[in-house]
Amino acid sequence: MPDPAPRSDLVYRTRLPVRLWHWTNAVTLFIMLMTGLMIFNAHPRLYWGAYGANFDHAWLEIGNHGTNGYLTIAGIEVPTTGVLGYAMGTAEAFPPLVTLPGQYNVPVARIWHFFFAWVLVSGWMAFAIYSLFSKHLFNDLLLKWEEAKPASLWHDIKAHARLHLPKGEAARHYNPLQKLAYLGVLLAGLPLMVLTGLTMSPAMDAAWPWLLVLFHGRQSARSLHFIVAAGLALFIVVHLTMVLLAGPINELRSMITGWYRLPPEDILPEPARSEPAQMEEGA
């Protein structure tokens, strides 16, 4: 009778500060994205430059022709009835299902958005300080020399495309694509969200006029704010998809308790041995 497969090791993979920041950030980003969509509904057009109003040329617009919703981007109009422009019986750019509050209320959405923006900034600063002093940034997030080589990155991309996820000891640490994604959010996505958000505030523009110079106008900052928010939403979708593929119970246990069971490595069957042909006597 064959020996049973060895049980995967249970390891402590996710430390408490990382878990706290993860869940705080998750709640904060969901609320900010949904309130941001409500604020966007007040003027569902995006522009480049310093000016933007109803009669200016918009590079992106979400609207409706009666009960027919549409998305116009770079002059190309795409029908979006039931998804954008007109959905769930409401003639809004984004339907109540994905906005906070559910019914059209921009003042309340702004209050929630600004409050959780401070939560986002405070959490980001605390996590950045922790990552530096605990060496989490250097030990866990920054790519090693071998991982940063193009051949290594391409190998990791192909493995993920084939859904060959890390197993055994390789699953104990972040893989190169995870590191790049997390660093992109931590060092680029969140800071850019904050800076473009500040640029849309007249009071901050008066205090820090260099923001308008940096982003070439308030409307450009608004467009970049929307694009980065869409990128973060895409990151969340990909992240949740990978959690489901890797095993949601094991991944959630790691982010709640810190303990993670290493997935067992695939055991390849030994190649069949061919017996040497025996010469018949007298042949």
Image: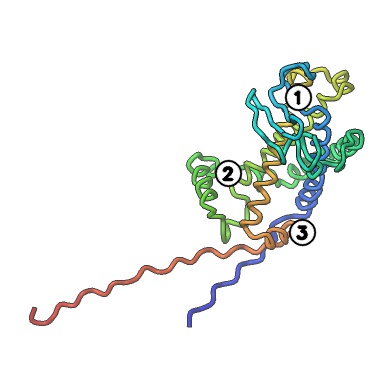
Packing grade of label 1 (10 A; few <14, some 14-19, many >=20) is many
The location of residue 223, given as percent across then percent down, is 73, 26
In three-dimensional space, the C-alpha distance between marks 1 and 3, rounded to whole angstroms, equals 36 Å
Please identify the quadrant where the C terminus is shown. Answer: bottom left
Q: Amino acid at mark 1?
A: Ala
Q: Indicate left or right for 67 with 277 as reference.
A: right
Of the image marks 2 and 1, the number of the one nearer the N terminus: 2
Q: Count residues near mark 3 (Cα–Cα under 10 Å), then give few for <14, some for 14-19, many for 20+.
A: some
Task: Find numbered disc 3 in the image and state the secondary structure of the residue it sits on.
Answer: helix
Residue at 67% x, 41% y: name it: 234
- Helix, strand or loop for disc 1: helix
Residue on which disc 1 sits: 221
- Callout 3 amino acid: Ile
Judged by depth in the image, the label closer to the viewer, 1 or 3, is 1
Horizontal relation, residue 140 to residue 114: left or right = left
The residue indicated by pointer 2 is: 144
Q: Which mark is residue 256?
A: 3
Secondary structure of the residue carrying numbered label 2: loop
Cβ atoms at labels 2 and 3 below 8 Å apart? no
